[in-house]
Image (cartoon, grey):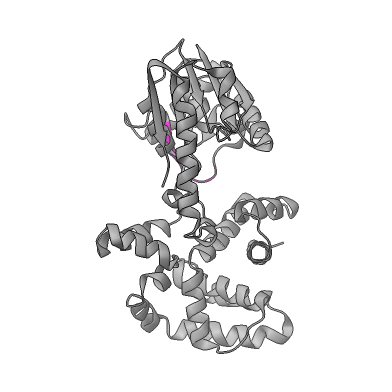
C-alpha cells in the first residue's frame, strides 16, 4: 500500500467512525508495513487534511457544485492539500491522486485538480481574505470565544500555530540503569538540547531512535509537559500524588526529579490507560511509583490517602484546545456545550484532592487549555 492510499483509507475511516486519527493511522501503517518515510508522508497528508478540512471543502465547492461521493471528496481533499499546503511537486500531487481514483471518477478528479492548479495563485490570494473559520478550519464558537478575549491579530496567529505540524521532542531518561548507553545518548544529543529551561529535552530530526525508546533511554514528550512538574518541585523522599496520571509521561519526569526516591502514587480512572502507564513506567525504570485506579470525582476514592501527600500534581482532563496543533481531532470533537461540564468536573477533582495535602503541602493545578 502506498502512503497516499494509506492516508485515503485512514481519512475515510476517521470520517466513518469515532476513532482517533492517530490510532487509525497506526493500525493501517502497521498492517500494510509502510516504510518510515512512507509512514511519515501518510501522516503528513492525513493530519494536514484534517487540520484544513473547511478550507479544502470550500475549494472543492468552487469547482464542483452538488453532491460528491464521500470517497471522492476525501480523495480531492488529499489532492488539494498537497497542491495548496505542501511543497510536493504539483504534477505529483495531481497525478498520484488521480491514480487513486476509481476509473469512472478519474476524469472528475483530474478536472478539479487541474483547474485548482491553474487558478492556484489567484486562489491563494483570495483565501487570505476568507473568514478565519474557513481559512484556518476552526469551529466558529471557538473563534468567537477567543476574539472576545484577544485581538484579531493574536487569534489569527493562534490559528496559524494550530495548523502547523508540530515538531517532535524527546526527553533523555536519566533513570536508565544502562549508564554506558545513557552516556552515548547524552553525547549524541548534546547539540540538540533545548537548554536550561527544559533540561534533558531535545528536538528530534527525522524519526526518533526506536531502540533508544524501546530500551527506555528516551521518552517522546513535549517540553511543555515539564512545566507543571518543575513548578511542583518534588524532592527526593517526599510523597507525591499524580492524580490524573496516564499515560505516565509526567509521572516519569516526577520520578526522575526525585531520583526515584520517596513515593509517587499515580492514579487514573481508566484501567486500559493504567496498563499503558505501567508499561511506560517499567520501561523507563521508574521504581518509586504505585499505580492505582482511582476516580477522584467519587469522594470515596480519597479515603485511603487522607491526608498523605507533600505535593500533588492535578493535570486535569480538559478540552485540549491548548494542544490542537498536536491533536488533530480536537477541533472536530469539541462542542461548546462540553465546556461548562468540563469546568465543573475539573472543579470537583480539585475539591477532592485538596484535603489530601499535608499541612504546608504544595499543589499544582494544570491544564493545556
Q: Position of residue 7 (x, y in %)?
A: 63, 63
Q: Is residue 266 visible?
A: yes
The residue located at (46%, 66%) in the rendering is 86
Residue 202 is a magenta residue: yes
Point out the residue furthest to the right here: 31
The residue located at (48%, 86%) in the rendering is 62
167, 183: nearer the viewer: 167
Q: Tell me: 350 left or right of 110.
A: left
311, 276: nearer the viewer: 311
Assign the N terminus to one quadrant of the image.
bottom right
Q: Is residue 89 visible?
A: no
Q: Tell me: 49 left or right of 141.
A: right
Query: Is residue 184 positioned above or below 126 on the image?
Result: above
Q: State the image quarter where residue 283 is shown.
A: top right
Query: Is residue 106 positioned above or below 344 on the image?
Result: below
Residue 138 is a magenta residue: no
Point out the residue furthest to the front here: 299
Query: Is residue 83 positioned above or below 222 on the image?
Result: below
289, 120: nearer the viewer: 289
Total numbered circles:
0
Q: Position of residue 312 (x, y in %)?
A: 45, 24
The residue located at (30%, 63%) in the rendering is 147
Q: Position of residue 155 (x, y in %)?
A: 31, 61
Query: Is residue 240 positioned above or below 223 on the image?
Result: above
Magenta segment range? 201-207
Q: Position of residue 78 (x, y in %)?
A: 57, 70
Amino acid at each position: 500500500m502506498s502512503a497516499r492510499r494509506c492516508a485515503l483509507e485512514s481519512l475515510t475511516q476517521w470520517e466513518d467512525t469515532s476513532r482517533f486519527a492517530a490510532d487509525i493511522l497506526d493500525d493501517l501503517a502497521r498492517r500494510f508495513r509502510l516504510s518510515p518515510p512512507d509512514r511519515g508522508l501518510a501522516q503528513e497528508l492525513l493530519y494536514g487534511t484534517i487540520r484544513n478540512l473547511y478550507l479544502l471543502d470550500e475549494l472543492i465547492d468552487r469547482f464542483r457544485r452538488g453532491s460528491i461521493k464521500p470517497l471522492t471528496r476525501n480523495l480531492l481533499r488529499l489532492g488539494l492539500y498537497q497542491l495548496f499546503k505542501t511543497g510536493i511537486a504539483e504534477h505529483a500531487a495531481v497525478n498520484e491522486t488521480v491514480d487513486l481514483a476509481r476509473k469512472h471518477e478519474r476524469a472528475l478528479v483530474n478536472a478539479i485538480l487541474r483547474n485548482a492548479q491553474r487558478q492556484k495563485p489567484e486562489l491563494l490570494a483570495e483565501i487570505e481574505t476568507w473568514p478565519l473559520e474557513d481559512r484556518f478550519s476552526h469551529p466558529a464558537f471557538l473563534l468567537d470565544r477567543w476574539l472576545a478575549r484577544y485581538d484579531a491579530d493574536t487569534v489569527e496567529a493562534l490559528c496559524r500555530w494550530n495548523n502547523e505540524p508540530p515538531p517532535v521532542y524527546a526527553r533523555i531518561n536519566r533513570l536508565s540503569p544502562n549508564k554506558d548507553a545513557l552516556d552515548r545518548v547524552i553525547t549524541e544529543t548534546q547539540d540538540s538540547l533545548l537548554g536550561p529551561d527544559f533540561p534533558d529535552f531535545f528536538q528530534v530530526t527525522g524519526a526518533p531512535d526506536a531502540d533508544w525508546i524501546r530500551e527506555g533511554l528516551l521518552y517522546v514528550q513535549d517540553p511543555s509537559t515539564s512545566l507543571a512538574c518543575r513548578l511542583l518541585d518534588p524532592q527526593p523522599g517526599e510523597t507525591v500524588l499524580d492524580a490524573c496520571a496516564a499515560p505516565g509521561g509526567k509521572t516519569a519526569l516526577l520520578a526522575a526529579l526525585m531520583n526515584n526516591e520517596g513515593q509517587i502514587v499515580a492514579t487514573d480512572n481508566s484501567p486500559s490507560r493504567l496498563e499503558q502507564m505501567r508499561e511506560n513506567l517499567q520501561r523507563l525504570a521508574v521504581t518509586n511509583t504505585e499505580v492505582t485506579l482511582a476516580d477522584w470525582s467519587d469522594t470515596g476514592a480519597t479515603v485511603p490517602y487522607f491526608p498523605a501527600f507533600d505535593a500533588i500534581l492535578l493535570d486535569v482532563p480538559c478540552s485540549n484546545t491548548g494542544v490542537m496543533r498536536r491533536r488533530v481531532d480536537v477541533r472536530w470533537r469539541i462542542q461548546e456545550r462540553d465546556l461548562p461540564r468540563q469546568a465543573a468536573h475539573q472543579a470537583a477533582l480539585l475539591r477532592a484532592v485538596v484535603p489530601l495535602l499535608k499541612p504546608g503541602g504544595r499543589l499544582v493545578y494544570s491544564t493545556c487549555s
